Amino acid sequence: MDKSMEKIDIVKLLIYLLILIVITLFMILFVIVPNVKEYRSSKVVYKKSLVHKMRVENILSDRNIEYSNLNSENIRAITSFMHKFSTDNFIKYAGKFFTRVSLVEVDKKAHKKEFIEYKLKVSSSLLSPTSFYVFLEGLNRYENIIQADFPIRMEANGTKISSAFTIKVYDINSTK
């Protein structure tokens, strides 16, 4: 027969058990409970941050869609700024509509800090006024951003019409 169980002192066992329970309760009260409170406050902060992050991501997504739409709608204007203005190319282009073209630079200034504005005086000779209007319509498809300014002066000299007008060419300010 096993008599090892008879030697166990019940009082000592209860004291050890009580000490173990007190230590466990002490650990629960002073270590785990404060961490649970901190965890709850951190969880609230995390949820608020997550909501804010989702809002910002939605706004960013909307802005990216808007940017893509604007980029596709204005692709011609955007690519126009990639080409440097060349007087030779412009005279060659205007030569399709006029019999004689001369170009003189009048002014060059910064326009709203992002762009440079060239003012050029164009003198030309043409056979009919319709070719002038076709030229103005064609400026919308020219490789640079060009604006024809008023006044446009036209005088008839027999079979030819001489014209003089000012154009503005916009270029990106690369020194900015």
Image (cartoon, rainbow, N blue to C red):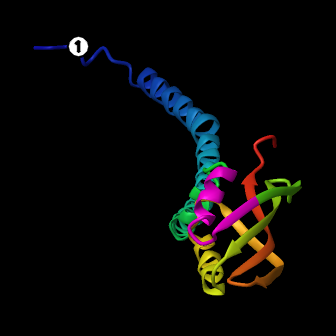
Q: Residue furthest front?
A: 158
- Of the 4 image quadrants, the one containing the N terminus is top left
Residue 26's place in the image compared with 101, above or below, is above
Residue 30 figure quarter: top right
Left or right: 37 as drawn, with respect to 3: right
Residue 6 figure quarter: top left
Residue at numbered disc 1: 4
- Pick whichever, 64 or 120, lies toward us: 120
The residue sitting at 81% across, 75% down in the picture is 149
Left or right: 158 as drawn, with respect to 18: right
Q: Position of residue 90 (x, y in %)?
A: 64, 58
Residue 53's place in the image compared with 134, above or below, is above
Left or right: 95 as drawn, with respect to 173: left
Q: Position of residue 157 (x, y in %)?
A: 77, 82
- Of the 4 image quadrants, the one containing the C terminus is top right
- Pick whichever, 92 or 74, lies toward us: 92
Q: Residues within 10 Å of mark 1 (few under 14, many from 20)?
A: few
Q: Say what amino acid the circle numbered 1 marks.
A: Ser
- Label 1 SS: loop
Q: Which residues are magenta?
A: 87-102
